[in-house]
Amino acid sequence: MAPPNRPRPVDASMTLLTEVIKRPLDAGYAEAAQRKAAQTQPGPRWAGLPVLVVALVLGLAVAWGVRALRSPEPADLQARAVLETNAQEAYAKVEALTQTAKELGAEVRDLRQAALGQQDPAAARQAQALAAVSGAVAVTGPGLTVTLQAANDEAGADADPE
């Protein structure tokens, strides 16, 4: 049997549990809670004013920066105007050349038809048919109709996988 004046090993481990049960808060937490309970008057109303001023200054600085970056420079505007003028002139030139090409193509067809029609009518008909096939002349007619449908699951199941 253990001597009576010596503490038991179990008692040492129980002290921690007893301490946690008796005083659940740390001393620093308890002091802070007491100070908060004792403080009845809130801080001055203007305590958040510095934060508000800093936020306002930062907001204005960001707005000014965005405005400065988004405003076009006069040189940029002038370059854009020159590019637009060049593009419009090039477009007009392309339209004029396209019209000239159509007119010259029609003239070549007429001259070919006249020359071949007098010498060899069969060759003239063949040249006209080849022009339609090659896409040299515009054609009209019913054309080709393509119809697409989703595959049938049953048809796919019946198909041989080989």
Image: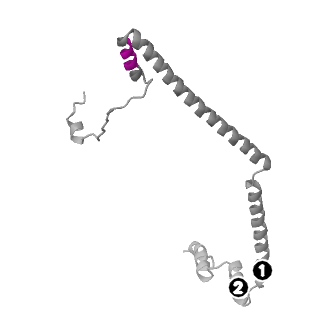
Q: Relative to 151, is 137 on the left or the right?
A: right
Estimate the x, y position of residue 48 in percent, counting from the top left: 76, 77
Q: Quadrant of the C terminus?
A: top left
Q: Which residues are magenta?
A: 123-130
Task: Tell me which corner region of the image, top left, top right, bottom left or bottom right, holds residue 99.
Answer: top right
Q: From the image, tell me which residue sits under label 1.
A: 47
The vertical placement of 69 against 100, above or below, is below
Q: Earlier in the sequence, mark 2 or mark 1?
A: 2
Q: Nearer the viewer, residue 8 or 124?
A: 124
- Disc 1 residue type (three-letter): Ala
Give the residue displayed 37% in from the left and 19% down from the top.
129
**Mark 2 or mark 1: which is in front?**
1
Q: From the image, tell me which residue sits under label 2.
A: 36
Estimate the x, y position of residue 1 in percent, counting from the top left: 54, 74
The vertical placement of 145 against 66, above or below, is above
Q: What colour scheme governs how the chains and residues are painted in the rendered image of this protein?
A: one colour
Task: Tell me which corner region of the image, top left, top right, bottom left or bottom right, holds residue 55.
Answer: bottom right
Q: Secondary structure at mark 2?
A: helix
10 Å crowding of disc 1: few (<14), some (14-19), many (20+): few
| Prevalent SS, magenta region | helix
- Disc 2 residue type (three-letter): Lys
Q: Relative to 158, is 62 on the left or the right?
A: right
The vertical placement of 139 against 29, above or below, is above
Q: Is residue 57 magenta?
A: no
Q: Is residue 88 visible?
A: yes
Q: Nearer the viewer, residue 66 or 121?
A: 121
